Amino acid sequence: MQISKEHLKILDIIVKIGMDNASRSFSKTIKRAALIELVRTELVDISNITEEMNNDLREMVAAMLRLEGTFKGKLLFMIPLDGALVLQDFYMGLSPGTSKTFDEYTEGTVQEIGNILASSIGNSFASDLGSTLLPTPPQAICDFAGTIFSSLILEEGINNDNLLMTETKFKLHNTETDCYFFLLPDINTLEESLNILEKSII
């Protein structure tokens, strides 16, 4: 994947706009202030990040979905189980600490967050790159980080050496939760769109 530093700067801006939009959408959903803060956006080597995920022994909850349209790929939002339970309490209007175990409500909460993130990121890409991005319904998974991550790259990892990783933080009330946001785009579509955008900026 021939992504330059300038391309990464552009992607960082696009993703940040998407995260800001997602924060507003999620805040409206739970009826209280929420911030999905961008920490970093970078192109990572699949073998290195796979090793990192396999060494992360925390149980995670994830929403995985496919992106259809002129911009194709896969998207994965992954958050530690304890963080997902906190979000579930906020989402359902419960006191923090009420939810103790993964259940259908946790699944629904993470799926909704996946939908919000995918729609917000999709709108950013559509606005800035002129690409149509249509997310499919998310699949919720509760497992260890390495197992979830392997399912993301099972097919695409054969053809791609790198993927786009966005590290984010959820800030709600007095809580802060680290989470991962992976985007595995179609190489040709991404490069073509970024090249066009870069020329228009210059």
Image: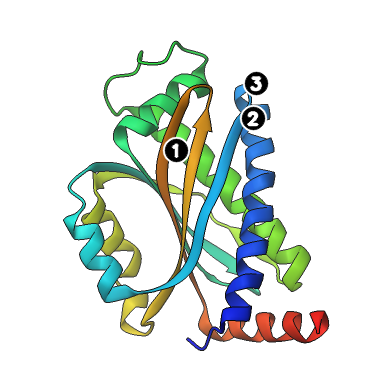
Residue under pointer 2: 27
**Label 2, residues with CA under 10 Å away: few <14, some 14-19, many ≥20:** some
- In primary-sequence order, the first of circles 1 and 2 is 2
**Label 3, residues with CA under 10 Å away: few <14, some 14-19, many ≥20:** few
Residue 76: give its label. Answer: none
The residue located at (64%, 55%) in the rendering is 16
Q: Is mark 3 on a helix, strand or loop?
A: loop
Mark 2 and 3 residues: CB-CB less than 8 Å, in contact?
Answer: yes
Mark-to-mark CA distance, 2 and 3: 6 Å
Mark-to-mark CA distance, 3 and 1: 17 Å
The residue located at (69%, 54%) in the rendering is 17
Mark-to-mark CA distance, 1 and 2: 15 Å
Say above or below: 69 vs 83: below
Residue under pointer 3: 31
Q: Residue flagged by tag 1: what amino acid is it?
A: Val
The residue located at (33%, 77%) in the rendering is 157
The residue located at (36%, 82%) in the rendering is 161
Q: What element carries label 1?
A: helix
On the image, the x and y values in percent for residue 69 come to: 64, 69
Say above or below: 193 vs 62: below
